[in-house]
Image (cartoon, rainbow, N blue to C red):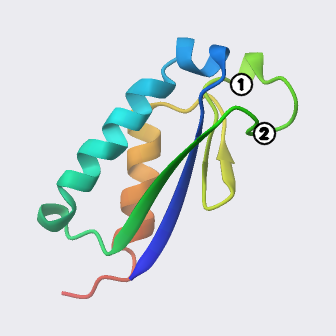
Amino acid sequence: MKKLIVEVCVCTQCVLNGAMDIIESIESLQKLKVQLRLNAQIQVVTTTTLGEGKHTCAAPVVAINGEIIEHADSETVMSKIVALTTKDVKC
């Protein structure tokens, strides 16, 4: 089983721009893992030091297995997670 590490910045700017909504979306996705046939363990990590220095203009910032997504929103993050976790699933 693949393991995804999803880091979500929870600095003030990121929280004000939707970081908590992203975390809630990921948690709801984990509850639907079986129905969506996701073949991965998803670990959510919060941090205040994601990306380079201050990222006021890039908030919220999320990293999935080290790949940084600036101006992240729930839809973008969920799409990326689903794409990465269903890639190796064979029907």
Name the side, left or right, on which 34 lies relative to 59: left
First reached walking from the N terminus: tag 2 or tag 1: 2
Mark on residue 58?
1
Q: Tag count in the figure?
A: 2
Q: Assign a secondary structure to mark 1.
A: helix
The image quadrant of residue 37 is bottom left
Looking at the rendered structure, the kind of residue marked 2 is: Gly
Q: Residue at x 61, y 21 (%)?
A: 14
Looking at the rendered structure, the kind of residue marked 1 is: Ala
In which quadrant of the rendered image does the N terminus lie?
Answer: bottom left
- Please give the residue where the numbered disc 2 appears in the rendered image: 51
Residue nearest the viewer, comparing 80 with 11:
11
Q: Is residue 15 above or below residue 45?
A: above
Q: Assign a secondary structure to mark 2.
A: loop
Q: Residue at x 54, y 60 (%)?
A: 5
Residue nearest the viewer, comparing 59 with 9:
9
Name the side, left or right, on which 9 lies relative to 84: right
Name the side, left or right, on which 9 lies relative to 83: right
- Report if the CB atoms under discs 2 and 1 are less than 8 Å apart: yes
Q: Nearer the viewer, mark 2 or mark 1?
A: 2
Q: Residue at x 39, y 26 (%)?
A: 21
- For disc 2, the neighbor class at 10 Å (few under 14, some 14 to 19, many from 20) is some
x then y, percent, for residue 26:
36, 44
